[in-house]
Structure formats: structure tokens, C-alpha cells
Image: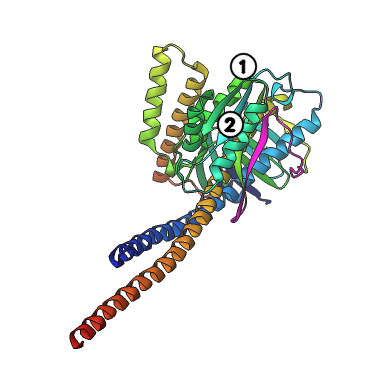
Amino acid sequence: MAKLQVELVTAEGRLLSREADFVVAPGVEGELGVLPRHIPLLTPLRPGEVMVRNDGDEEFLFVAGGFLEVLPDRVVILADAAERAEDIDEARAEEARRRAQQLLEEQPEGIDTGATALALERAVMRLRVAELRRRHRREPPPTVHVE
Amino acid sequence: MPSLRDVRRRIRSVQNTKKITKAMELVAASKMRRAQERVAAARPYADELSSIMVELMRRNPEYKHPMLVPREVHRRVLILVTTDRGQVGGLNSNNVRLALREINSAGVPVGIVTIGRKGRDLMRRLRKELIADQSMLGDRPTMGDVLPAVRVAVDAYVDGEADQVDLVFARFVSTGRQVATLTRLIPVEPPEDAPKIPADFLYEPEPKDVLDALLPRYVEGQVYRAVLENAASEQAARMQAMRNASDNAEDLIGDLTLTANKVRQSTITTELMEIVSGAAALEG
């Protein structure tokens, strides 16, 4: 079966460049799964989880938003910020989540509600990706091929 | 004639200074290499964004995002990138001079966003209108460090408080050459050298939504790249400045050593003369 060449780049550099069978990314219109020979596609991303699967081996990453670009020969994820699941600083994300939530509840003068809601979403997704990764480590996935 | 002790003390002092400038030169050289790597690492993201933008604009020539349309200029914003620390030769003064020339010839009020302490301090002393500042970013600036300052400039444009946004930074040409550069950020001019995309895209949701999301990021990316380049330029300029300082110290040590020898020689000559004439007086 054909493979996808997946690249995840941020403004700071290239975080990922590898072959894969299947990629999942959080599009603004909903989760998107990309298999080889997908039609060329361009969409913005929400904060969320990116999954890259290759031969049953799954890698999880967090992206803070950005774009997904599906080309005939490769998939490019342009992320505003991205981290491998195992690199997520959970204590910091938890702190950010608490702060954003508090701001949204108290609604102090001059606060940008949209930006704060987005910050909250980012923090929550960061925590979820980290959580997923932990669970993932406990029970390794079956090594069956999903075509 | 200075005393021999004073000259020797002076030589020691210059030698110590030279040790410091030499060390700073070496540190700057290694930091420069890393700064250059960071500039290179930022390239794939910037190239990809440019390609997508050009492709979107080619496909939708009728859609005009406000950030693409020039309008009558009543107020401007200038983002000035400088270093936080000195010992960089003329790097900062060149950036500041270019910025000031632009501000003074603009003919409309110009709000200034500074990234870097040197530019901020100077603009504050000159009582220019500072609207935002982001300084002390260190040697490894991240996108997140730069973002707040850029947001202020972009928001000013979107809210209609400014009609044009420019950027001044030191472009890294080579180790020996850094050029103060002025570029226009908004209204956005599509890059001409963007690589072409070999695909007919399906857009989700709509091309214009993608473009709306893309333009602010393109501007942010440009500023971030300018900050990285300025950081590389900073290290290159410091390396050069410190090399000059070390060379000057070397010359000064040479001159002072010569003086010291002369002083020593003339002291010996004087003493000999005294002994000889003393002995002659006794004999006579």
C-alpha cells in the first residue's frame, strides 16, 4: 500500500517528517482522517490532537491550530505551535486551563472573551492529548493493519 | 616621561581587556552559528505559508481581504527590531536611523512597536509614540515571545487605527555584512518568489475562510523571521566589533611595550651617567 509523507512544521522548525499510513488532524469543520491518495485539500485546524500511524505504531501530537495541506505526495501540517504528547508540560497546561476558566467566569473589564475561550480550548486539548498518550502507553494497540 | 610602573600597569590592564573581548568574540561566533540555524529552521514554515497564500490569491482574484487592500494612509505603525544588549558596532544605530528617517518623512503620525531594549530606550528618550514593546527575548526567541507585539500592530490595522504597518530589522547578508532593512507588512504584498503548488485544492470550508486565517499568520511569520535574522545579525556584528576591539588592544599593547622599554632604557642611561660622573668627580 502507498504511504504518505507527513511533515509537521512550526515557525520554529520541523517537528516531524516521516512516512505514515494514516493521519488524523483536527480540522475546523471536524476531525479529518487522511489516507494515501486523498484528494488535495486545504483547511485551517482547531487546537487538538494529531495522530500519525505507521505500521500500527501510533504517534500523538498536540497542535495549537494552523493548517492542514494534503498534496498528492505528502501531507503538510503547518502548526502555530505543536508538541509531541510526551513533551507536554501538564502542570503548565493545567495552570493555563485554570486561569482561562477563572477569567471566563469572572468576566473582568476589558477581557477578550474569544481569545480567552480559545486559550481554554488549547489548554484542555493539551491535557487531553497528554492523557491519551498515557493511556496509550499502558495498553499498546493491536498491531493489525487498518486499511 | 611616565614612570615605568605606570606604563606596566597600563599594559596589564589592556591585556585583561583583550582577554575579555577575545572571549566575547568567540562566544558571539558560536551563538551566531546557532542563530543562523534557527533562521534556516524557520524557512519551511514561511515558504509553505507563502505558497499557499499565492495560490489562494491566484485562484480568487475577486476576493479582497482588508489586509490586502491599500487604503488612504492617515496613521502608520512601525515595528522596530533592535538588540537588547550593546557591543554590536553600528547595528542598532543603523536600524534606528532608518526608522527615524521613515517616521520623520511619513507626514502622518506613526505609532512605534519596539522589539528589543535598545530601540525602546532610544524611542522613549526621543519621546516618540510607543504603542507596544517586547524586549528581553534572549538568544532563543520563540514565536510566542514575539506574538504579543505583532498582535498590537495587526489589531491596530484591523481596527482602522492604522492604515499601514512597516517593519525595520537588520537583514543578515553575511558574517561581515548586516543591512538595516525596511519592509512593508500590511497591506500584504504577495511574495513573488514563492514555490508553486502542484495541486488543485479542495478548500474546507471556503477559500476565503482559509485566506482569512492565513493572512495574520503570514504577517506574524514575517516578523518572527525578522527577529531571528536580527538575532543572527546581532551575533555577527558583535563578533566583528569584538574582533576589532581585540586587534586594537593588541596594537595598544605593542605601543605601550615600546614606551615601557624606552622608559626603562632612559632610566638606566640616567643612572649610568650619574655613576660615571660621580666617579669622575671623586677622581678629580
State the image coordinates of residue B204 (x, y, percent, origin top left).
Answer: 69, 28
Q: Which dot, 1 or 2, sits closer to the camera?
A: 2
Q: Tell me the quadrant of the picture where the C terminus of chain A can be found.
A: top right
Which residue in the structure is indicated by mark 2?
Answer: B79
Residue sitting at x 64%, y 16%: B160
Q: Secondary structure at mark 2?
A: strand
- Stretch in magenta: B173-197
> Badge 2 local density, few (<14 within 10 Å), some, or many (20+)?
many
**How many labels were placed on the picture?**
2
- On the rendered structure, is B147 left or right of B259? right
State the image coordinates of residue B280 (x, y, percent, origin top left).
Answer: 23, 85
Given the current orientation, which residue lies at the most extreme bottom position? Answer: B283
Which residue in the structure is indicated by mark 1?
Answer: B159
| Label 1 to label 2: alpha-carbon separation | 17 Å
| Quarter of the rendering containing residue A139 | top left
In this picture, is B176 found above or below B218?
A: below
Say the numbered circle drawn on residue B90.
Answer: none
Name the chain letter of the residue that bears numbered label 1.
B
In this picture, is B257 found above or below A110?
A: below
